[in-house]
Image (cartoon, grey):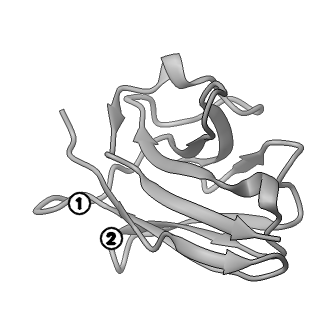
Amino acid sequence: QVQLVESGGGSVQTGGSLTLTCTSPGNAIPTGCMAWFRQAPGKERETVAQTDSDRSQAYSNSVGGRFTVAKDRFRNILTLQMNSLKPEDTAIYYCAAGREAYCSGVPRPASTYDDWGPGTQVTVGS
């Protein structure tokens, strides 16, 4: 099992930016398929973005063009750069890792990931 920890959440106004970071304390960040998910109150957990060992990326339709996922192996972190934030982006954001080296070409559901962080809150005010 891989321990994951998210950081970087907070409160911003509409149109603002935040960068979330995911680390694996005491270990190297997993080299395979990793993703960011989010869950708003009363809603299901949804895939936000994913990347894998080939650095291929996939995004949900709701964040494409505004969010960027990246795996920095030198700094040993997974990041999610979020720009042009909207109130509907308000949610708890989770980092997840799978066992496979490669993600599929489309965002994978939460059930396909094995390890999760505790989440970090992102709140976007109108």
Q: Nearer the viewer, residue 14 or 81?
A: 14
Q: Is 111 positioned to the left or the right of 108 in the image?
A: left
- Up the image or down, 1 lies above or below 81; here it is above
Specify which label sits upstream in the sequence, 1 or 2: 1
Residue where numbered disc 1 is placed = 28
* Labelled disc at residue 65: none
Residue 17 image position (x, y, % from top left): 70, 81
Q: Residue furthest left?
A: 26
* Tag 2: amino acid: Asn
Q: Amino acid at mark 1?
A: Ala
Residue at 80 percent of width and 42 percent of height: 60
Q: Is residue 82 left or right of residue 5?
A: right
Q: Rate crowding at label 1 as few (under 14), some (14 to 19) or many (20 or more) other CA atoms within 10 Å.
A: some
CB contact under 8 Å: marks 1 and 2: yes
* Numbered mark located on residue 76 in the image: 2
Residue at 80% x, 52% y is: 88
Measure how far apart labels 1 and 2 are at the Cα level. Answer: 6 Å
Q: Residue at x 59, y 43 (%)?
A: 38
Q: Residue furthest top?
A: 111
**Element class at badge 1:** loop
Where is residue 77 shown, x and y percent of the image? Answer: 38, 68
Residue 81 image-quadrant placement = bottom right
